[in-house]
Image (cartoon, rainbow, N blue to C red):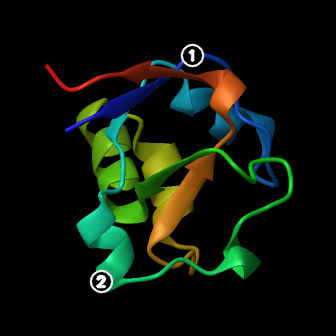
Amino acid sequence: MARIRIVAVPPGFAPLSIREQWVGIEIPLATNRDISKNPPSELGIGSANRGGYMVLTSKAIEALKSAERISAAAFWKQLTLGHYLVFKRDVCELIPEP
């Protein structure tokens, strides 16, 4: 499964201290099966990240927890975000499937 690694602070509405905690995190990309099962809503994607890499919110929060970035995981978990988060392409490195 292809993944992304966040290599720079992503844009968005969250406080800078929360967004900074994404740097270095690896997250699997949402699959076609994920997307067909739960189609994304354009309403949930901020304009700063539109057209970026889509990941499951649950997998992103899990990745933060695994990296012991508990305050960021808690911040994202308490929001009602829907099934997906989107990260702007220029803050990510694509890690292809082996």
Q: Residue 3 versus residue 78: which sits nearer the camera? A: 3
Compared with residue 24, is residue 66 higher up or lower down, i.e. above or below?
A: below
How many neighbours does mark 1 have within 10 angstroms: few (below 14), some (14-19), or many (20 or more)? Answer: some
Q: Report which residue position mark 1 lands on.
A: 7
Judge whether 86 appears above or below 98 on screen: below
Q: Quadrant of residue 22?
A: top right
Q: What secondary structure is found at the residue carrying circle 1?
A: loop
Instruction: Please tell me whether residue 22 is drawn above or below residue 85 in the rendered image.
Output: above
Nearer the camera: disc 2 or disc 1? 2
Decide: few, some or many residues near mark 2? Use Cα within 10 Å; few <14, some 14-19, many ≥20.
few
Residue drawn at the location 75% of the way across and 48% of the way down: 49
Residue lying farthest right? 47
- Secondary structure of the residue carrying tag 2 is helix
Name the residue: 79% across, 39% down.
Answer: 11
What residue sits right under mark 2 in the picture? 37
How far across and down, in percent of the image, does residue 2 sit?
28, 34
Residue positioned 65% across, 40% down in the render:
18
Is 7 displayed left or right of 39 in the figure?
A: right
Q: Amino acid at mark 2?
A: Lys
Horizontal relation, residue 23 to residue 19: left or right: left
Residue 16: name its quadrant: top right
Relative image position of residue 87 (x, y in whole percent): 62, 43
Question: x, y (%) of residue 28?
Answer: 30, 42
Type of amino acid under label 1: Val
Residue 67: name its quadrant: top left
Mark pair 2, 1: CA separation: 29 Å
Of mark 2 and mark 1, the one earlier in the sequence is 1
